[in-house]
């Protein structure tokens, strides 16, 4: 059957137009269209793998909006910046040869509802900063981009097993001299398709035509319409679906790993933000205690001067009170500076400028302070009860009582249950175990590379080619072709590098199993330590509450006795210092206990982080009853 004979010039013209049309359509795509296509493919892959990895789907947006809080603070508070890059990529001036692409696309930030008043200090709550951190933190942004890049890598691996089309044209002008000068012109076009099958077979097909002759319906230059097909099949080394698709398999699993790591990162990041937020509030409370202590020191200094003038205190005692006032002032200033430093570090952590006018909402400490106040009230009652009882004889044996579990917090669960839950849920442990399986497959691939290579190949060519000036080249006769077959053998004579690679893969397998073992031990150690920290923090909270009660009573008594002239000024000053320490210790104990609760939930992998970056804690009853 001769295609040229059946279709004639019309089909030849149709082939040329189709070829040109395909080239034009392929060449008309803009960089923006390619980027948008890549985004769609990556978003689809991420949604598929999210369902597989974590059982839910949510958009993963990697473009930073132009109205994020960081940028609005810079503008509205008139903060200095070094360049346009401080604001975002959309503020960069295009450089020469920049592609025509409206990048980055305009998007809306979820924290745009937080109002910023020009040159006014912005007050933020814990809920606010968790949302802000999820959209402003540069590290959080980098983690999202890593997931997105892993999805694109998977798309590249999947593309290897799809039809890969190619097309192009080639024009040549040849001149021959030496007697009569002869000029010939060749104008060819080609289109092809390649396909790698998952069993290792590689198939290639190409069609070539003399483009100018088809368009001119047989005028100048040569005639030519040809086809070329080939196939190559590995029979030994490199054969088998498990060998050929290994890069694809690894890419598929790598996206799941990236999502697991990102989920783990979100929990760790949210707990870190919350911990630092509470730390700043704790420093604010310490500053308030330092202010009260400074005021008390001023009052004590005035009293000592008055009593010194009356001859009731010696000049040395008066000087002690004045010196303590100066020390209290220094402590007050130091507490203020520590607060500023912690606040600056916190702002950078959540992705806001260090010099932005920000203050945190102290009301978020109230629920924790209520817990401390309950202990204080309990200790006041206990203190009065003990004072009313008959004193225990000094000769009575000292009885040490271990902390009871009766007043244990809700997250002080059984250690064995907590460890089992952690080993079942920890996403980083899943990744580590998955890596063991990955290395096992790498061992198989390395062993396959030790084998001999045996490839079966075949090729078929039909018709003519550009430059062949024979009439029969006009058509494509499938009965008149050139066929060839080949069988190539590569004996494994020198396999030094492959041998070493195989041995290295076995070492990697041992290393990956040890990593699982080490991570398991780290998880167990972390859970046990955090449960101990909960118990210790609870006892510290009770002890600090009792210390506050005692210190308050001591200060009141010292003040009354000083006014009565029955104690020295040093006793009052010591009581003031003790009260300040007790108040600060109580605040630290409250925050430490809350931090320990969050860290335990994080390491049990039971914290849920919403799309907005907020924390959702789990009910301890779920694991107590084995649910």
Image: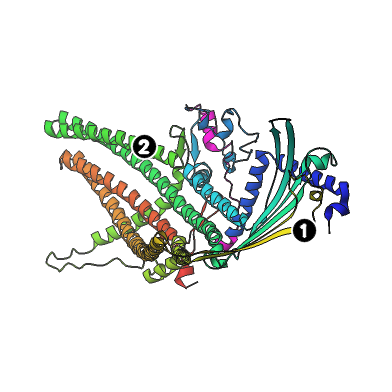
Residue at (12%, 30%) from the top-left corner?
A: 315
User: Looking at the image, which is closer to me, 222 or 342?
Assistant: 222
- Structural distance between the alpha carbons of marks 1 and 2: 85 Å
State the image coordinates of residue 167 (x, y, percent, origin top left): 70, 46
Mark 1 vs 2, N-terminal side: 2
Q: Is residue 266 above or below residue 433?
A: above
Q: Is residue 105 left or right of 214 when viewed as pictured?
A: left
* Disc 2, SS: helix
Question: Residue at left 32%, top 37%?
Answer: 335
Relative height, residue 432 to residue 320 (above, below): below
Q: Does residue 220 lie above or below 6 as drawn?
A: above
Please tell me which residue lies in front, 114 or 556: 114
Query: What residue would you read off at disc 2?
Result: 341
Read off the magenta span: 50-79
Q: Is residue 205 above or below residue 321?
A: below
Residue at mark 1: 480
């Amino acid at each position: 059957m001769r295609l040229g004979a059946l279709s004639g010039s019309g089909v030849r013209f149709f082939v040329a137009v189709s070829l040109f049309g395909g080239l034009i359509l392929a060449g008309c795509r803009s960089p923006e269209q390619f980027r948008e296509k890549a985004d769609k493919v990556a978003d689809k892959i991420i949604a598929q793998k999210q369902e597989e990895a974590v059982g839910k789907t949510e958009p993963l947006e990697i473009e930073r909006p132009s109205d994020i809080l960081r940028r609005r603070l810079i503008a509205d508070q008139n903060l200095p910046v070094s360049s346009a890059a401080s604001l975002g990529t959309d503020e960069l001036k295009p450089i020469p040869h920049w592609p025509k692409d409206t990048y980055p696309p305009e998007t809306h930030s979820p924290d745009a509802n937080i109002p910023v008043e020009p040159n006014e200090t912005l007050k933020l709550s814990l809920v606010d900063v968790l949302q802000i951190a999820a959209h402003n933190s540069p590290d959080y942004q980098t983690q999202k981009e890593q997931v997105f890049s892993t999805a694109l890598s998977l798309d590249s691996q999947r593309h290897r097993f799809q039809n890969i089309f190619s097309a192009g044209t080639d024009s040549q002008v040849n001149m021959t001299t030496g007697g009569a000068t002869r000029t010939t012109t060749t104008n060819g076009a080609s289109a092809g398709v390649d396909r790698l099958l998952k069993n290792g077979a590689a198939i290639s097909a190409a069609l070539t035509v003399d483009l100018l002759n088809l368009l001119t319906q047989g005028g100048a230059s040569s005639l030519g319409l040809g086809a070329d097909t080939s196939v190559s099949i590995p029979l030994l080394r490199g054969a088998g679906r498990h060998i050929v698709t290994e890069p694809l398999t690894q890419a598929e699993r790598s996206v799941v790993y990236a999502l697991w790591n990102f989920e783990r990162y979100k929990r760790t990041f949210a707990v870190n933000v919350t911990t630092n937020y509470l730390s700043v509030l704790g420093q604010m409370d310490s500053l308030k205690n330092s202010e009260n202590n400074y005021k008390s020191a001023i009052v004590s200094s005035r009293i000592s001067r008055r009593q010194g003038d009356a001859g009731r205190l010696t000049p040395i005692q008066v000087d002690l009170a004045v010196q303590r006032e100066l020390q209290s002032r220094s402590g007050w200033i130091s507490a203020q500076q520590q607060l500023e430093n912690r606040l600056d570090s916190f702002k950078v952590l959540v992705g806001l400028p260090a010099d932005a006018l920000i203050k945190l909402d102290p009301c978020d400490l109230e629920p924790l302070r209520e817990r401390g106040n309950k202990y204080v009230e309990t200790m006041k009652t206990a203190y009065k009860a003990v004072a009313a009882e008959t004193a225990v004889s000094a000769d009575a044996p000292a009885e040490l009582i271990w902390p009871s579990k009766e007043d244990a917090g809700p997250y002080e669960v059984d250690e064995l249950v907590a460890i089992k839950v952690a080993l079942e849920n920890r996403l980083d442990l899943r990744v580590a175990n998955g890596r063991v399986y990955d290395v096992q497959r790498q061992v198989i691939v390395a062993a396959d590379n030790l084998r001999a290579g045996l490839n079966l190949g075949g090729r078929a060519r039909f018709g003519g080619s550009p430059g062949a000036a024979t009439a029969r080249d006009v058509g494509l006769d499938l009965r008149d072709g050139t066929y060839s077959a080949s069988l190539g053998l590569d004996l494994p004579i020198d396999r030094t590098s492959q041998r070493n690679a195989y041995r290295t893969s076995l070492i990697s397998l041992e290393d990956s199993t040890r990593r699982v073992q080490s991570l398991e031990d780290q998880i167990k150690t972390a859970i046990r330590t955090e449960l101990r920290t909960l118990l210790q923090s609870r006892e510290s909270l009770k002890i600090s509450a009792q210390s506050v009660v005692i210190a308050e009573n001591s200060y009141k008594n010292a003040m009354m006795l000083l006014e009565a002239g029955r104690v020295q000024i040093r006793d009052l000053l010591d009581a003031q210092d003790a009260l300040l320490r007790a108040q600060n210790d109580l605040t630290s104990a409250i925050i430490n206990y809350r931090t320990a609760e969050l860290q335990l939930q994080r390491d049990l992998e039971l914290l849920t982080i919403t799309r907005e970056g907020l924390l959702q804690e789990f009910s301890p009853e779920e694991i107590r009853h084995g649910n």
